Image (cartoon, rainbow, N blue to C red):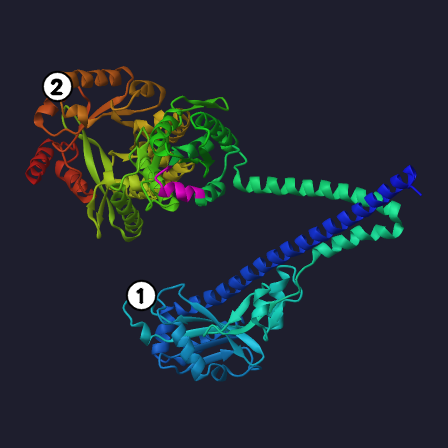
Amino acid sequence: MPISIAGRITLNLVAAIVVTILTVAIAVWWMAQAQNEQAQINTRTMVTGGIVAMEDNVKAFANDYAWWEAGYNAYVAHDEAWVDANFGSGIKDTQISDILVIISPEGEIPYAWAIDNDRGAPRDIFSPEIRAKIKLLAVGMPVENEAARAAYFRVGDSILLIAVARIAPVSRASEVDPATLPFLVQGVYLNHSRLHELGRQFLIEDLSLNLEATDHAIQSGFPPIKDFDGNLIGAFVWSPPTPGYAVLRSVFLPIALGVLVFCIIAMATVLRARRLALSQGKSEKLAINAARRDSLTDLINRFGFNEFSEARAFADACSRGEAAIIYLDVNGFKSVNDSIGHQGGDELVKRLAERLAIVMPPDATFARVGGDEFAVALVGSTASQAAAGIASAMVHMLDQSFGVGGFQFQVTAAVGYAVSDGPEASPAELLRRADLAMYHAKNSAERDAVQYHPGMETGALHKKRLSVALRSALESGELSVVYQPIARANDLAIVSVEALVRWDSHEFGRVSPADFIPVAEETGLIHDIGKFVFQRACEDMADWPGIKVSINVSPAQLREPNFANDLAAIARRHAVVPNRFKLELTEGLLVRNPTIAKRKLARLKSMGFGLSLDDFGTGFSSIGYVRQFPFDWLKIDKSFVAELGTNPTANALIQSMIALGDALDIAVVAEGIETAEQLKLLRLLQCEYVQGFYLSKPIAAAEVTALFDRLGEGRRIQTAMAETARTAERMS
């Protein structure tokens, strides 16, 4: 009998139901298995990390106790009381480990401590065979801090994790023979409580040891434990998590309600599972994207950029010479945050990113790798040729100022780039070269992008050594302060002195300020150097009543929020009134951040400090700044003075500067006077004050005091300065 239409429909429906049930069952089972496998992988990764951390803790303890000058001396002196009171405290008091043993170079155990001896006394556990293996473990171990090594070995029905380090004299570590140094061995038993505590960190309740572990257990993913000889002595084991089975139980429960109800619930479950899967996938995608992108600019971040640069495709492009990297660092960004807050700074960063993105080719990888740092990676046959143009365009995209929060900011940047030149230029090397080129541009105040070249390497290494030595110089007293007098032009009476910092390095000899001041500004040491000079000036000027002292101020110092308060505090501590100081500033800070500079200078002025504009005439808009800012002094740059009498233009320019100072009621100082003819011409031009080697070289504070005593109350220095000038000429 032919099957009716109703039968066919029913059969189709039944078949559809059966197929649906089987499909859902298989899909759910597969999802559960996948979830179980992923959970097991995650758990294995976490446990492995926890084991490494446990080993690091053991090694850290051994490092702390072994790298100890007093401990080594006590051991050599056989001071048992000291050794027991100090080394033994690691066991008796802190109980940070179970066993602490000191083994002599000959393999003897003069000292040993343990919390308890349930598994045997330390001297029994560390048998001659074990001691020999410990000695082999230490072969090649450097005599330095953080050099401890870890190992496992079987002790009865337990496993002991040890860390071995040499007990070394810190001050003479490089001079001693490692073979003569004793070993410090610190160990912990992998007991139930310790493993339970480790497992709880990862929601594992049954982390334990399998002392009968086989290769099959290791192949199953459990971390192995091997002894000195690489023999398998156990494994860390636990019950693999099975979160997927819980899902299975919740899905198959509705089957009991009947096929129809099951199908409806199954359909709802499938739809719900699909929605959950889509939601989870979207969440994971968002999480991955968030981990690799900068939330402020929506560019990729440092992690994403490093991930891109470490990819195989970029490495291949580097080896073919078809890759380039550009680094950009914004100059003076901290001052923006100081003036308009971090919210305004964030707005400026977004504007920067939008403007820089305009010059990026479609295939460029553009990233924000720091607060005020950006990076670009280029790949392709034209990458090397395109890098120079893009880098230059990035610099010039910042020529126009930015309006943020009602303020205008003129932002500049240091840009460096490097292009791959063959197989030796790995991605990491290309990143390093671009970074080095950027720092070269920053330190050289380059207005355009700088390409890496091998000649930068020596300078970078020297600068690194210089920065390390400069930090030490501040602590060891290598820095000193000298003073150069500033006198009235008409009668050469001293009115003030300029404080100048000098560095006589034990390593480099006399280092020019032109070399170490930029390094100090880059490393932040300029703040400590500035305080040192100001404090020394306060101490010295106590013997010079009525004399003012000029102090040079770096733009980096002025950007420090507490700069003015720090100066005022030092002056109060030495009972010196601020109006005896003139703070000399260059025009660079005023050009880059006029709004911030105006506020900072007004603050210093209100405290009583005098202000002087240094190197006047060498900037772009000096006259405009003289009118805007509350300067008391102008210092005509020595480059103009050097051409006096030989260049009519220089004469006219200096006369104009003096006239400008008279018109604005600002005192004018001409610096760099080296000849009697220059002094004579400056007097004819009615320059008010002069300074230079012809009058006096920079001299120590004691010489300044002696000069004042010799010249008497009037402090006339014509004869003394002429004598000093002649001496300087003979020395040169």
Task: Return the residue at label 2.
Answer: 647
Task: Return the residue at label 1.
Answer: 171
Horizontal and vertical percent position of residue 396: 37, 24
Element type at marker 1? helix
Disc 1 and disc 2: Cα gap in Å?
62 Å
In the rendered view of the protein, which quadrant contains the N terminus?
A: top right
Secondary structure mainly formed by the magenta segment? helix
Horizontal and vertical percent position of residue 243: 70, 56
Q: Is residue 294 left or right of residue 323?
A: right
Q: Is residue 362 left or right of residue 660?
A: right
Q: Is residue 252 left or right of residue 109?
A: right
Q: Residues within 10 Å of mark 2 (few under 14, many from 20)?
A: few
* Bounds of the magenta segment: 313-323
Label 1 with label 2: CB-CB less than 8 Å: no
Horizontal and vertical percent position of residue 729: 7, 36
Residue at x 89% of width, y 50% of height = 257
Snapshot quadrant of residue 649: top left
Q: Amino acid at mark 2?
A: Asn
Within the magenta stretch, is there residue 319?
A: yes
In the rendered view of the protein, which quadrant contains the C terminus?
A: top left
